[in-house]
Each structure stands twice: as C-alpha cells, then as structure tokens.
C-alpha cells in the first residue's frame, strides 16, 4: 500500500524495509508499552516524585525525582505518556511544554548538587509545538536542557524506551551511555513530520521512517546509541516486569562503568562522544579568492584606479545572493 | 552578432526586478543589493547570502575562512523524492557554497571574533554533520584564541537527510558553550529570517546576547509540522522576532543598517574575561576538563591551550588508546586533536 507513494525509478527504501521500520514504530508507540511510571517502581526503590518547574506550572508530560537503585541514590527523569485517552490528555501524549524541560533542569541541578547519577527515560513523539509553547520559549527550554546535560558533573545513563522524538527527546537525552530498547525508535523528526515536509503528504510516514533509519539497530550502527536492551517475547508490551528487569541490569552495568571514571574524565569523554557523532569528508580546499592577500601591483593599481585593474573582490562577489525560490522548509 | 555594452553585463533582464513580498512593490535588484537587501519602500528585510553578510558585518578584508574543505557525506543513503547527494549538488551549484554554513575569523570594528554564518539558500540552511562540525570548531577556536564567538543563523533546523546524526549536532554545537562559559568568553547569537527548529533549539537560543532582525520568522516548530501536530490553524505572527522580544527570548531587534554597529557596541561592553582571573566555580571548567584530557593525550594538547601538563610515557596512565595518540599535524590544532585523530 505504502510503496505506491514511492515515485517510479527510485529503488530506496525497499518496500520490505518500509514495512520493517514501520512495524518498529508501531511497537514503539504500542498502547500497552510500559511507560516511565510503569518502569520506575519495577527498577527503583523509594521513588519520590517531585513536581513543578518553580516558575510556571507542573508539566505532567515529564516526571522525575530521586530514587534508590539497589540502595544507591539516583535521580530519575522521563517523558510520561498515558495508557488511555484520559491519561493521554492529562499527559499531553507525552509531549512536553517548556515548563516540563525546566522541571527536568531543576532535577538535573539537584542531581549535580548531590552527586547522584542521572537516569533518563525517553518516550515522546516530540516537544509540543503549539503557540503557547512557543510563547514560553520551547526552543530555549530544549537548548538550555541540552547545555545543562553536557556539563553535568554526574554520570548520565539514557534509556530510549519508546519513541525518541527529536529535540523533545534530546532535551533529556544527552548522556554518557545512551541505550535503547530493541523496539524503540529515535529520529530527528517524527516520520509524519518528515513525510509532510519532504513528501508533502503525511501518508508517506512509513517511507520516511525507513529513510531516516530510526530503529534501534540502525541507531547503534550509526553510533548514536551505545547499546540495545533486548525485549521479552513479542515486545515490551507483553511483559512489563521482564522489560524492567532487562533495563535495570543494563542501567546497573552502565552506572558501574561510569562511576569509576572521575569527573574530569567523565566530562572529557562525554564531550568527545558528542564531537565524534556525524561523519564528513575533509580535503584541503584553499580559501576563496576574497581571502587572498593582493599583490603589490594589484594594490597600487587599485589605489591609483588604473584602468583594467579589477576592483578588490568582495565576499558578496564570491557568494552573491540569488533568487532563493521562495520558502523551502527543509529542516526539523 | 549582438552588440554588447560593457555596462550591461551584470544581469539579464529576467532577474532585474524582485517583488517585495511585504509591500508588493517591484524593487530593482541592484538597488536592493545596494540597500543591504532591505526594501526601500517598506523596510522588509530580504534574506542575504553568506557573502553579503560577511561584507555587511566584518571589517574590510579581515575575514579568513576556515575549514573550507569540509563536505557532507550521505551516511543514511537518504532518498526522498530526490537523493540526498543530488540535493547537495543542486545547492552547491545554486549558491557556490560547499555547505549551508561558513566559519572563519575576522574583525568587527577592530574586535577579533570567531564567526559562523548560515546561508538559507543551501538546503534551507539546514544543520547536518558538517554544519555542526564547523560551528563546534568555531566555538573551539573562540575558546582557544580567547576571542568572542558570533553566529549569524538562518536555518530551517536540523537536516532530515542525516537523521539523528543531525539531531545530535544540537548537542555537539551546544557542548562547547559550557566551556566558553567557564572560560569567560562571550557568545553573541544573531537570528535572521528564518531561524527555526533544531538550530533555534540549540546554540542560537543560548547567546549571552541575542540580536534579531526585524520581522524575522523565529520559532521552534515549522508551520507545517505544528499545524499537522496540533491540528489547528496557527495565529499570525506568533513566531516573529517581535513576539520573542515581547516574551523575553531575544535582547533586541536591530535593523540591518545598524547591525554591524550594534555588534561592535556589544563586543565593546562584553569583553573576554581576563585569563586566569576566571573563578573556577566548577571543577569541570575547561582547563580542568582539558587538563584531564591532556593527560590522556600524553600532554600533547597542553601547548595549544597554554597549560603545563607533564607528558606521560606513551602507554602509561590509562593504558591503551588515548595515551598514544598525538595531535594532528596542522597548525590550527583544535583542543580536540585527540578526537580528530580517532576519527581518521
């Protein structure tokens, strides 16, 4: 059905790839998939949920607070989706407002102050994009969360449990170890959003999902995540307890690895980990002409306005403006 | 053979005029370029190329481009209705640029700065791995040389064609800002039409001072994504520079003719902290982090950041890989030489 939308002559992505990717997206969004608040009591003891960003309100789309991980104090933060219509409305389908990210920042600072490792659970389609979220600084809230996490002095373990959707996920998703459940997905934009922009049709979401290579296995291959946590049976929705056990084991392993590093090394490696991400080609292309020092003859010629001596090249000659063909919205 | 007049070589008749989208007046292109691409009738700010920005903002002949040879690859083999490499090539032909951002050093009214600039015409100014790398290197240059950093943004956001690799550029470009903070080095963010998505949701929102151009579209979610997600029509102008000023997310809106003078004034009143006098409130300040890093590199980095670290014998300390790496051979060795080395 979906492959009919691929224009003729384009071989990628293949229909079976589309189906495979879309199946994972559907599992990641499964209504019975364990949510953050389903997992926390199965992984941690003594979780105390803290509320509010101390500035505007409590955003129920993000939950968090201190807890014990096998008797060791940690800070836990996660997106919270609902399981039915009512709880989904309360949780805004797991799409946080700026105050949600500011609550998360408050908890991160507390972890920093107390020196407790930070564990985050990612499960959101993305940050809420409405006008009131814009007015309260959605972009700033995400940006400052990311910045805070890159400099946090405690170990950070990130677990993508469902959907890792764009900036709203990354805002609590910068870590020293980033793990994903087997059927979790991670993407720069929701497949529907990508399809709306690049295919001009939300119907093409399954193709976009395949093209963006958003499955956990793809993300591991790309070096964006560090490990995959196997799910029980047909998927995490079939056995919450077993899923929680697997996640707990992975978190314990990661925290143990990171605890021995010491703050300086921890931060240096976190920085290096981010700096490594994203391949590129590099050659010794010389700088453009406008950057060259002119010869004496040329400079004298220009000074005396000798005919035939070209005027000093300006950067706007090197890179002039051109008709930009209207709005081409190609970013996320 | 047609007679050619020497003064008519500049532009063909087909692109001599542009219709102003704001006041519907026809504007002569040469007049537009001479007027800093601002409509002489209504003051509408047209988008500028990177070259025009450099001429507008930087002292004559001061700009030196860095890392001009960085080029995108296609890690996802991404193909929508067009293959990613074809889109890149089309943008290269259209703009004469190799990527959507350029960075280098230059001076503004005599203040030396590290500056990154976006060109929206190159794939919507979208940020993929190369743009992220350039900006990270721009910030690292500011850190190393202890000069202010400036980024002039014009971007639709993260580049979808590189998937989460683009998403992670938000963190890659934001991480150096923590080091600039600890080192006492100012960062000025300039937001131009349009700045949205992942670029706004990272470094662009984090300037110590944030300057926007009049009526620039600035917002988190692109209109198509937002209306698709919340399923309603969006109010007019809620993503404008003026709205951000009102809500406290930019410091000032500055007309293009005043932009250079404003940046010069900001650079004057936002000096780089005197080295050594920065109080290290955190043990993880850049020197702390870097010295830790430097030890792992066997002291190789210490020269470039001016701290003394006793070189360790290769293979000692942490043992395996890191201690045996050496810095890159190029002279503009960044503080992340070790990281670069690893990539090769």
Image (cartoon, grey):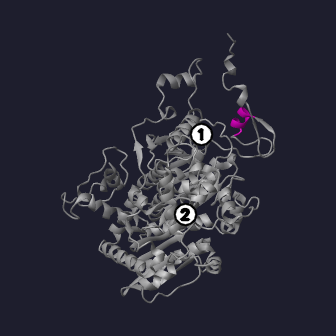
At label 2, counting other C-alpha atoms closer than 10 Å, the crowd grade (few under 14, some 14-19, many 20 or more) is many
Q: Nearer the viewer, residue A254 or B196?
A: A254
Position of residue B307 measured from the top left corner of the image (x, y, whole percent): 32, 59
At label 1, counting other C-alpha atoms closer than 10 Å, the crowd grade (few under 14, some 14-19, many 20 or more) is some
Q: Name the mark on residue B84.
A: none
Compared with residue A264, is residue B299 higher up or lower down, i.e. above or below? Answer: above
Q: Quadrant of residue B223?
A: bottom right
Which span is picked out in magenta? B28-35
Q: Considering the whole magenta stretch, tell me its main secondary structure.
A: helix
Q: What is the chain letter for disc 1?
A: B
Q: Are marks 1 and 2 in contact (CB under 8 Å)?
A: no
- Pointer 2 residue: A167
- Pointer 1 residue: B55
> In the image, are marks 1 and 2 on the same chain?
no
Position of residue A181 measured from the top left corner of the image (x, y, whole percent): 43, 70
Position of residue B143 measured from the top left corner of the image (x, y, whole percent): 43, 56
Position of residue B234 measured from the top left corner of the image (x, y, whole percent): 74, 61
Q: What is the chain letter for disc 2?
A: A
* Residue A153, magenta (yes or no): no
Q: Nearer the viewer, residue A234 or B83?
A: A234
Q: Residue at x 41, y 61 (%)?
A: A217
Q: Is residue A31 left or right of residue A250?
A: right
Camera-near label (1 vs 2) is: 2
What is the count of numbered marks? 2
Real-space Cα separation, disc 1 to disc 2, in angstroms: 34 Å
Q: Is residue B191 left or right of residue B139?
A: right
Quarter containing the C terminus of chain A: bottom right
């Amino acid at each position: 059905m979906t492959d009919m939308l691929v224009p003729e002559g384009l071989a990628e992505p293949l229909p079976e790839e589309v189906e495979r990717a879309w199946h994972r997206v559907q599992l990641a969004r499964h209504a019975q998939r364990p949510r953050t608040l389903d997992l926390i009591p199965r992984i941690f003891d003594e979780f105390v949920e803290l509320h509010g960003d101390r500035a505007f309100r409590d955003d129920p789309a993000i939950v968090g607070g201190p807890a014990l991980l096998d008797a060791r104090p940690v800070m836990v933060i996660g997106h919270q989706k609902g399981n039915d219509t009512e709880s989904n409305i309360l949780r805004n389908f797991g799409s946080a407002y700026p105050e949600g990210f500011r609550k998360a920042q408050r908890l991160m600072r507390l972890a920093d102050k107390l020196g407790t490792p930070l564990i985050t659970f990612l499960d959101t389609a993305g940050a809420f994009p409405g006008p009131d979220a814009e007015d309260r600084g959605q972009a700033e809230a995400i940006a400052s969360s990311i910045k805070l996490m890159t400099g946090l002095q405690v170990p950070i373990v990130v677990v993508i449990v469902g959907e890792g959707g764009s900036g709203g996920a990354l805002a609590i998703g910068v870590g020293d170890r980033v793990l994903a459940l087997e059927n979790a997905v991670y993407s720069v934009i929701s497949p529907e959003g990508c399809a709306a922009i690049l295919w001009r049709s939300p119907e093409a979401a399954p193709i976009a999902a395949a093209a963006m290579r958003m499955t956990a296995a793809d993300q591991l291959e790309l070096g964006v995540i560090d490990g995959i946590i196997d799910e029980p049976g047909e998927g995490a929705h079939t056995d919450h307890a077993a899923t929680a056990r697997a996640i707990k084991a992975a978190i314990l392993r990661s925290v143990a690895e990171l605890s021995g590093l010491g703050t300086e090394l921890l931060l240096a490696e976190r920085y290096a980990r981010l700096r490594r991400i994203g391949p590129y080609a590099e050659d010794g292309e010389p700088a453009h002409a406008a950057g060259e020092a002119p010869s004496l003859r040329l400079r004298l010629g220009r000074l005396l306005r000798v005919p035939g001596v070209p005027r000093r090249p300006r950067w706007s000659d090197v890179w002039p403006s051109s008709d930009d063909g209207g709005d081409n919205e190609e970013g996320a | 053979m047609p007679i050619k007049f020497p003064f008519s070589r500049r532009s063909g008749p087909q692109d001599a005029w542009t219709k102003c989208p704001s006041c519907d007046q026809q504007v002569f292109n040469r007049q537009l370029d001479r007027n800093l691409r601002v409509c002489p009738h209504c003051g509408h700010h047209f988008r500028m190329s990177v070259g025009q920005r450099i001429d507008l903002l930087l002292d004559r002949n001061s700009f030196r481009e860095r890392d001009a040879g960085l080029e995108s690859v296609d890690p996802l083999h991404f193909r929508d209705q067009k293959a990613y490499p074809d889109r890149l090539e089309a943008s290269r032909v259209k703009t004469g640029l190799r990527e959507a951002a350029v960075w280098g050093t230059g001076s503004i009214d005599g203040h030396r700065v590290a500056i990154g600039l976006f060109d929206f015409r190159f794939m919507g100014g979208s940020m993929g791995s190369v743009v992220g790398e350039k900006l990270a290197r721009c910030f690292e240059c500011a850190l190393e040389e202890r000069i202010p950093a400036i980024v002039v943004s014009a971007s639709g956001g993260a580049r979808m064609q590189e998937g989460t690799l683009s998403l992670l550029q938000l963190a890659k470009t934001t991480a150096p800002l923590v080091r600039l903070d600890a080192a006492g080095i100012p960062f000025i963010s300039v937001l131009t039409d349009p700045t949205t998505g992942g670029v706004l949701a990272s470094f662009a929102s984090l300037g110590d001072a944030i300057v926007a151009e009049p009526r620039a579209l600035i917002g988190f979610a692109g209109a198509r994504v937002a209306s698709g997600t919340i399923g309603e029509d969006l109010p007019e102008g809620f993503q404008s520079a003026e709205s951000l000023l009102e809500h406290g997310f930019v410091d000032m809106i500055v007309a293009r003719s005043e932009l250079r003078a404003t940046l010069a004034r900001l650079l004057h009143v936002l000096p780089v902290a005197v080295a050594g006098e920065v109080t290290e409130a955190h043990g993880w300040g850049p020197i702390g982090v870097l010295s830790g890093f430097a030890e792992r590199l066997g002291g190789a980095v210490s020269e470039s950041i001016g701290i003394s670290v006793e070189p360790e014998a290769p293979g000692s300390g942490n043992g395996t890989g890191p201690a045996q790496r050496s810095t890159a051979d190029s002279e503009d060795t960044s503080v992340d030489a070790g990281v670069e080395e690893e990539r090769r």
